[in-house]
Amino acid sequence: MIRKKCEVLSSRRAGVYHTLTLVAPEIAEVARPGQFVQIAVPEGREFLLRRPFSIHEASRRGGWAGTLELAFLGTGPGTTWLTQVQPHDFLDVIGPLGKPFPYPRQLTNCLLVGGGYGAAPLYFLAKELNARQKRVDMIIGARDQDRVFKQVEAKRLSVSIGITTEDGSLGDRGRVTDILPGMVSRTGAEVVYACGPNAMLRAVAAYCADHGIPCQVAVEELMACGLGVCWTCTVPVIRRDGSGWDNLRTCVEGPVFNGARVWWEKWLREPSVPTQTPPHGFRMEEAGVGGEPWPEHE
Amino acid sequence: MARARVSLGVDLGGVQLPTPVLGASGTFGSGRELAPVLDLSKVGGIVTKSVTLRPVKGLPTPRMVETPSGMLNAIGLQNPGIDEFLEKEGPFIRGVGVPVILSIAGKSVEEFVQVAMRAQHVPGVVALEANISCPNVERRNQVFACHPDAAAEVVGAVARLSRLPVFAKLTPDVTDIVEVADACVRAGAHGISLINTLLAMAIDVETFRPRLGGVTGGLSGPAIRPVAVRAVYQVARALPEVPIIGMGGIRSARDAVEFLLAGAWAVAVGTASFWNPESVVDVGRGIGELLVRRGLRSPADLRARVVVEEEEAGEPAHRGG
């Protein structure tokens, strides 16, 4: 874990997404796929906390040696501010943070499944797996073709790729899990890595658990510090020996977890229903989902 | 002009701190987590995350919401329990070289006492902070600091049975914080920590749901600083001999000095550490520079120096509005 003022090398759009390249040799040298950095956005009314970003690329050699690349969507006030930084600006960066994706020791056929810009760390992972002579195939899913993240690069890094969009504007219409079984059998996948929306991860992990395929997922949870001290970013994970479960910190024990050991039902509880009918225009969750009474305590 | 030699050290009635700036409970771990990005030898001390008798898994996520100039948290006192905590962190605390104040919590007087008894023999632990004001507990009656008698009962029991000085951490969510502070001191509290987070809530207007898994949570950050300064001012005026550790939204040395002027003997930096993990050190250094500029020798020279004209102050401050 290193804290550095890092110069912005480039800041550009990639479809609807935004990518930032930072000069961060100390971090790039030790970063591994699945890890993340915490970036300070200006302190102020809207910006009390750093923002976490998974590492899309960490270059140690070649023309880009010593750089980190991040990809994100400018949605909130912090990420919107970050889309506006210019080359030669400096950002206060802490990283690399968290546990990386483990590499398979013997298994060789790896299927990487990404959703939206959540797919970003999988490109870094694909390169590292290729360097270890693993077979890499990828599934990239998104809402529509504008949100399919870097499919050209995905093609370059993998033996085959599958693309799904919810509106059918690119690749197969549907979700990544619709083509997952076919891709698994066609590629002979022996291990699955997934990164993207938590609901997608849950579906991928469930398929893998049912079919006995090892599955590593990189999850997202709201995080205040990223350093292991605030305990806000926890995920319920079942112990290896099955003796119980623990709320583990995404920032220290994660963000990569064994998909079969994340207690998805407990973590991503179905939302409870508003007691009154909301005015027209509000998103109403499906009725009949009571969920557990909360707050829930030990 | 010959400059007076500045010493940052403060004496909290026998508890010596090398600087007046501590890492606040729940934002600093045991200090070990931040060691890679912070020179721990330059902090005034570490207040650990609260430890209970048995392991606590805490509340479901989301546990955090960023709000204007603040954040809400609803962790629910997640911790491994005192035995595992001491096993894991004891060696670090023994060797860290700066004072450690161990924060303890519990659902009953008995639990507080048992945690205190196990914690008090760890070398390096110079005091206990009784967290009787965490808002993220199952029932409001577990917020002992909401009731002077309940607060006094917990703090009194811990103070009687522990060999370490006890600071009572109080909530501003009461009608009269002086009454609670006074009850704690009469019961044997060595000092008072002011303030814990304020009970708060945020609602998602799209889903109609609370934005925290715990429904309500504790508000921290600069948003609460004026409330904290007020609480310190009131308690310091009523109990000038009692060491006060002031905290709530401190980000800079100037923020910290505000607390010292209000009557704090030392301060703690909390939420600011999330943005700048070196805040505790930066604030300490800044206080030193401010003392030099003012020609003062010690943080104690600023203590309770706020100038309030009695005629203008109106009602006795501790009575509240």
Image (spheres, coloured by chain):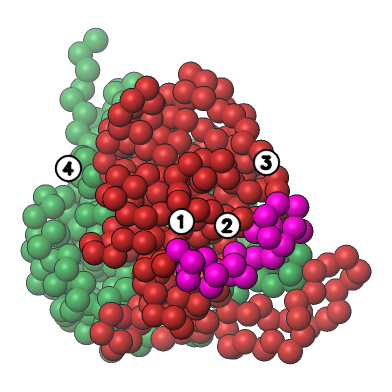
- The reply, left or right, for residue A285 in relation to residue A215 is right
Q: Dot 1 lies on which element?
A: strand
Q: Chain of mark 3?
A: A
Alpha carbon distance from label 4 to label 3: 46 Å
Locate residue A19, reporting x and y percent: 55, 35
Residue visible at 83% across and 81% down in the picture: A276
The residue segment tinted magenta is: A164-187
B133 or B191: nearer the viewer: B133
Name the residue that disc number 2 marks: A162
Spatial distance from mark 2 to mark 1, Cα to Cα? 8 Å
Question: CA gap, disc 4 to disc 1?
Answer: 49 Å
Residue A142 included in the magenta stretch of the image: no
Looking at the rendered structure, the secondary structure element under dot 3 is loop
How dense is the environment of label 1, judged by Cα within 10 Å: few (below 14), some, or many (20 and up)? many
Name the subunit of mark 2.
A
Q: N-terminal of the two: label 1 or label 3?
A: 3
Which mark, by number, is residue B41?
Answer: 4
Residue A4 in sight in this render: no
Labels 1 and 3 within one chain: yes
Farthest residue to the right: give it. Answer: A280
Chain B shade in the render: green
Q: Residue A163, position in %: x, y?
A: 61, 55
Q: Residue at x 52, y 45 (%)?
A: A155
Q: Which residue is mark 1?
A: A137
Which residue, given by chain and number where applicable, does mark 3 sit on?
A: A16
Labels 2 and 1: the sequence-earlier one: 1
Q: Chain of mark 4?
A: B
Neighbour class for label 2 at 10 Å: few (<14), some, many (≥20)? Answer: many
